[in-house]
Amino acid sequence: MPVPADPFRRPQAVVETSIDPVMLYRSDELSARMGWRPSGWRAARRAGLRATRYGKRWYVRGADVIAFVEAHADQD
């Protein structure tokens, strides 16, 4: 029997998780797609993720995200 939905719980937003290499992502969009908290974003920047600051926002190219993840993937 299915469990009834909790009426007091907020519905979770559906976040797309794919990264398009030709897109430009804001840091908050990228963090949501990658599942990063603010500390994860800072750690990625310190580890070499290329990003550009314009005004008060950070922007990252999708190709740079893919290159960063491939370079830092665990080698099994």
Image (cartoon, rainbow, N blue to C red):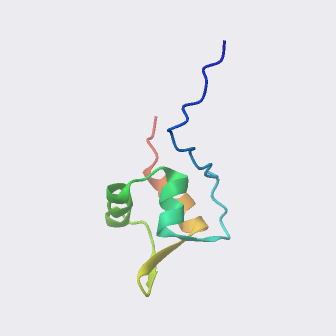
* Left or right, 10 with reference to 20: left
Q: Nearer the viewer, residue 73 or 60?
A: 60
Q: Which quadrant of the figure has residue 74?
A: top left
Q: Is residue 75 above or below residue 31?
A: above
Q: Residue at position x 32%, y 57% from top?
A: 39
Res. 23 visible in picture: yes
Image position, residue 4 (x, y; %): 61, 24
Q: Is residue 58 above or below residue 40?
A: below
Q: Which quadrant of the figure has residue 2?
A: top right
* Left or right, 29 with reference to 38: right
Q: Residue at position x 45%, y 40% from top?
A: 75
Res. 70 visible in picture: no
Q: Nearer the viewer, residue 69 or 38?
A: 38
Image position, residue 25 (x, y; %): 57, 70
For the N terminus, the image quarter is top right
Q: Nearer the viewer, residue 42 or 3?
A: 3
Image position, residue 14 (x, y; %): 62, 48
Counting the numbered discs, the total is: 0
Q: Nearer the viewer, residue 25 or 71?
A: 25
Q: Residue at position x 50%, y 38% from top?
A: 8
Q: Is residue 42 above or below residue 2?
A: below
Q: Is residue 15 above or below residue 7?
A: below
| Residue furthest out toward the front | 7
* Left or right, 69 with reference to 56: right
Image position, residue 50 (x, y; %): 45, 72
| Residue furthest out toward the top | 1
